[in-house]
Amino acid sequence: MSGQAVRPQKFLQPIDRMALGFMLVLSLLIGILLLSGDRTAPRVRDFNWKDKYVGAEDTAFILTFSRPMDHKSVEANLKITPALPGKISWAGRRMAYTPLSPVPYGTEYQVELEGAKDLFSGEQGKAIEPFNTTFRTRDRAFAYVGVEGDEQGRLILYNLTKQKKTVLTPPDLVVMNFEPYPNGDRILFSANDRQNQLKSLLTQQLYTVTTGVSFQSPNERSTSLQPSGKLELVLDSKEYQNLQFDLSPDGKTIVVQRVNRKKPSEFGLWIIQPDAKPRPLENQPGGEFLITPDSASLAIAQGQGVAILPLKPGAKPLDFLPKFGMVLSFTPDGSAAAMVKFNTDYTRSLFFVTNQGVQRELLRTTGSILSCDFAPQKDNLYCLLTQLIKGEDYQEEPFLAAIDLKDDDKDPDLPLKPLVVLPEQRDIQMSLSPDGLALLFDQIVSSPSAADKGLRTTDGQAIATGVLWMLPLADATTPDTPAQLKPEQLVPGFRPHWLP
């Protein structure tokens, strides 16, 4: 053992030398890459309006880039056709483009970006991969009640964009009132059996009917879209009469005013929610009511004021506004409302009321304040009003008017701008389009001889015929707008309502 020499083992085996060689080559390549920089061009990684039908609730589109971009070069090279004025904001690699006004419905837009540079590639920068895509807004469509031939009393969908009319409900039902669901795929409506309607029996029930359209993305529609005319009973009238109702903005809650047939003193509001049986709210009965934009509360006229009630059985009021007698509408975000005050001198006042405590009187009139709708941007309020006609007989002349809510210093004697004077009738329904660009309203002719049709106004008069009109509102409140705008006659019918 002591006579043998110890021979040292080789330091590197063949596999070690091979691994070391690979490491050296990789290190060299990494070094070259770091010195030369990234040669790939930046690109748009995501566009959130791709394959989507854009509606009024979609306030901005977002472009997400693969790397930080030079903001000025992106903003200078972004092209939208047709023109869509808007403002741009940035958050890292994300750029948001917010249109200055709701995107007009029934329009297809092209978005292009070419020539924009990234941020960290020197003075010249790397040009972005050309980006070109399209998006389109929802179709301009509305529903109404028919008046002619086999359309009498039936719910009808009219797609203005495609110039297509679809009858939704069967001939044995006479539609009383209706409200579309948020996605436009269904409509909630109350209807009476035609024979009972002719006998003036109050047996209306609540139904839903599919429209055959949907404003979801195209890849979702293929599995969820149902054909038009599919009817479903929501609430019967066996034990209770069903009166007015309202559908929450999120489409998940229905509130109905009901009267017990055997005990008329049992009168109040009921709530219907998914996967639950209809149940009474067990609050003090009231008059006109409206579900708030957050779909969590109810504004209802009670006694000498307006109460705000949670949508929970037996819940105590959240607030009470003793000054006002009616809520006409809310802004889409719920930050403000249009309310009516009934004055002791027999006049009525229209108020703009905010959740910050602002209560601004917009007008005072001896006529009536029938309805009001806020424009999507909350800058204008469109109202259906009446004015008294001087003479021995009491007559009211209805008219449509616009109130500019941005102008706090306007002449108090001229608080609004009349748009169209309407025929002498009280039962007029108007509906503001979701993009704020048009008003629908009806013109009804009533006659006692039309009682066999079963169509009646809200005050019980028999409807002989009716016509729908559309009033364009582009720049309706600007000083150079003509004193009287010209409405366009559409189709025979009444009670129009735009789809969301």
Image (cartoon, helix red, strand yellow):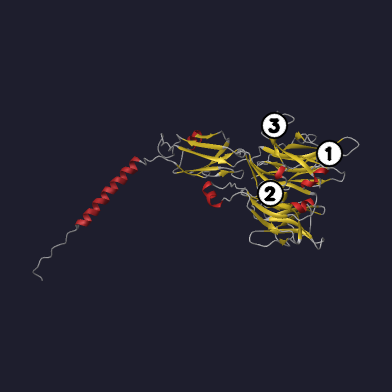
Q: Position of residue 220 (x, y in %)?
A: 53, 50
Query: Reading the chain from its start, which is encountered first: label 3 or label 2?
Result: 2
Query: What secondary structure is found at the residue carrying circle 2?
Result: strand
Mark 3 and mark 1 residues within 8 Å of each other at the beta carbon = no
Q: Position of residue 67 (x, y in %)?
A: 44, 43
Q: Is the residue 224 above or below the residue 395 in the image?
A: below
Residue 333: assigned label:
none
**2 relative position to 171: left or right:** left
Mark-to-mark CA distance, 3 and 2: 32 Å
Query: Reading the chain from its start, which is encountered first: label 3 or label 1?
Result: 1
What residue sits right under mark 3 in the picture? 478
**110 relative position to 463: left or right:** left
What residue sits right under mark 2 in the picture? 179
Residue at the extreme bottom of the image, as rendered: 1
The answer to which image quadrant residue 96 occupies is top right
The answer to which image quadrant residue 10 occupies is bottom left
What residue sits right under mark 1 in the picture? 396
- Crowdedness near tag 3: few (<14), some (14–19) or many (≥20) residues, C-alpha within 10 Å: few
Mark-to-mark CA distance, 1 and 2: 28 Å
- Crowdedness near tag 2: few (<14), some (14–19) or many (≥20) residues, C-alpha within 10 Å: many
Mark-to-mark CA distance, 3 and 1: 27 Å
Q: 21 and 400: which one is in front?
A: 400
Q: Is residue 455 in sight in this rendering? A: no
- Crowdedness near tag 1: few (<14), some (14–19) or many (≥20) residues, C-alpha within 10 Å: some
Frontmost of labels 3 and 1 is 1
Q: Label 1 is placed on what type of residue?
A: Glu
Q: Position of residue 216 (x, y in %)?
A: 56, 48
Q: Label 2 is placed on what type of residue?
A: Glu
Q: Label 3 is placed on what type of residue?
A: Thr
Query: Reading the chain from its start, which is encountered first: label 1 or label 2?
Result: 2
Q: Residue at x 88, y 39 (%)?
A: 394
Q: Residue at x 67, y 33 (%)?
A: 475
